[in-house]
């Protein structure tokens, strides 16, 4: 198995910022809050002293892996005689301190209340704000929640050099794809065992083979626990969770392969042993691996 590292272009955090900016501006204007800026700066005294218009600030103050949301199972992609194993994405948890800034406290509370209503109404960011930068990748689905802060807010304001202020903690869950993949060579589908028997000075040689293949549904997904049989040889087995099957002690020559699923779907093919094996599709037209032509000439 070979490791291939191809680091992708990743602007997902900046793209998430733009998605939040677009959502807040659109919803605020719809409710009459016009001319409100959306910033992502640290809310320090120096920064707040330069504000000239109502502002909503989303300061990203915590970023960590969301271990409770991590998907541990890699995905496999098969083709061209090899298998590419993709590592599962890292699930990041980004926490923003959301504050509102206006001249009057009453206006500030009105603005912060409306921002809270927007955030709790969108547990997932709308699809139309996930477009990303021109020419860049589209953001995946992003879930959000309004949560408790990870630290005492008095300590937070001391660390950023600002004055204590009411804030909302917004948590966004962002998957980040890895650039590392593993490539496996061609799957071994055929093994040959030669058995010799000597009687009266004369010897006979018998070849028995192990052959295999896959069973997929019409959408290309593996079918597990499907019954697979070679009726002419009396061999049978069942597919594993990846839709693969293997049959041992199969004699040389053409073999009929019959598949039946628990739902009653069936497929049939003819394969040559030894050979590349059989890939069968249930719920659709089976693939024939023997090189024979069908009766209709296809």
Image (tube, rainbow, N blue to C red):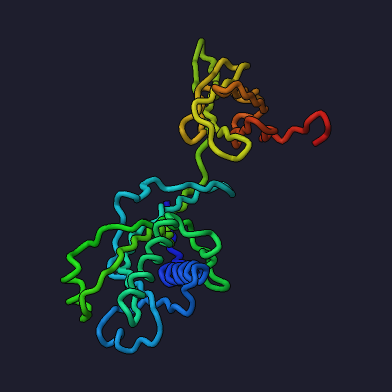
- Residue 15, percent from left and from top: 46, 70
**In the rendered view, would you say 104 is above or below 296?**
below
- Residue 283, percent from left and from top: 65, 31
> Tag count in the figure?
0
Q: At x 49% / y 72%, what residue is drawn?
A: 32
Residue nearest the viewer, comparing 9 with 1: 9
* In the image: residue 151, left or right of residue 51: left
**In the rendered view, would you say 293 is above or below 195?**
below
**In the rendered view, would you say 21 is above or below 103?**
above
Q: At x 42% / y 48%, what residue is drawn?
A: 74
Asked where in the image residue 259 lies, by quadrant, the reply is: top right
- Residue 282, percent from left and from top: 63, 30
* In the image: residue 185, left or right of residue 100: right
* In the image: residue 181, left or right of residue 290: left
- Answer whether residue 9 is visible to the viewer in this image: no
Q: Residue furthest right?
A: 296
Q: Residue furthest top?
A: 200
**In the rendered view, would you say 30 is above or below 197?**
below
Residue nearest the viewer, comparing 54 with 222: 54
* In the image: residue 96, left or right of residue 225: left
- Answer whether residue 197 is visible to the viewer in this image: yes
Q: At x 63% / y 33%, what residue is drawn?
A: 281
Quadrant into which the C terminus falls: top right
- Residue 279, percent from left and from top: 61, 35
Residue nearest the viewer, comparing 235 with 268: 268
């Amino acid at each position: 198995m070979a490791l291939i590292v191809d680091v992708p272009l990743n602007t997902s955090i900046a793209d998430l910022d733009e998605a939040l900016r677009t959502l807040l501006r659109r919803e605020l204007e719809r409710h009459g809050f016009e001319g409100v800026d959306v910033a992502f700066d640290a809310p320090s005294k120096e920064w707040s002293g330069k504000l000239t218009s109502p502002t909503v600030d989303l300061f990203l103050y915590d970023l960590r892996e969301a271990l409770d949301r991590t998907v541990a199972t890699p995905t496999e992609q098969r083709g061209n005689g090899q298998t590419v194993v993709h590592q599962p994405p890292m699930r990041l948890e980004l926490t923003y301190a959301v504050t509102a800034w206006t001249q009057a406290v009453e206006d500030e509370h009105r603005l912060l209340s409306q921002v809270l209503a927007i955030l709790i109404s969108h547990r997932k960011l709308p699809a139309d704000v996930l477009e990303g930068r021109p020419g860049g990748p589209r953001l995946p689905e992003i879930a959000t929640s309004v949560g408790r802060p990870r630290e005492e807010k008095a300590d937070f304001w001391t660390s950023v050099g600002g004055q204590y202020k009411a804030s909302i903690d917004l948590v966004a869950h962002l998957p980040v794809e890895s650039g590392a993949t593993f490539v496996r060579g061609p799957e071994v589908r055929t093994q040959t065992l030669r058995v010799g028997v000597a009687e009266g000075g004369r010897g006979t040689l018998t070849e028995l083979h192990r052959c295999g293949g896959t069973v997929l549904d019409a959408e290309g997904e593996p079918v597990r626990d499907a019954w697979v049989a070679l009726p002419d040889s009396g061999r049978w087995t069942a597919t594993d969770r990846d839709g693969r099957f293997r049959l041992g002690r199969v004699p040389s020559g053409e073999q009929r392969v019959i598949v039946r699923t628990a739902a009653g779907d069936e497929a049939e093919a003819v394969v040559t042993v030894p050979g590349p094996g059989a890939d069968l599709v249930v719920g659709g037209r089976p693939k024939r691996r023997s090189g024979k032509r069908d009766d209709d000439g296809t």
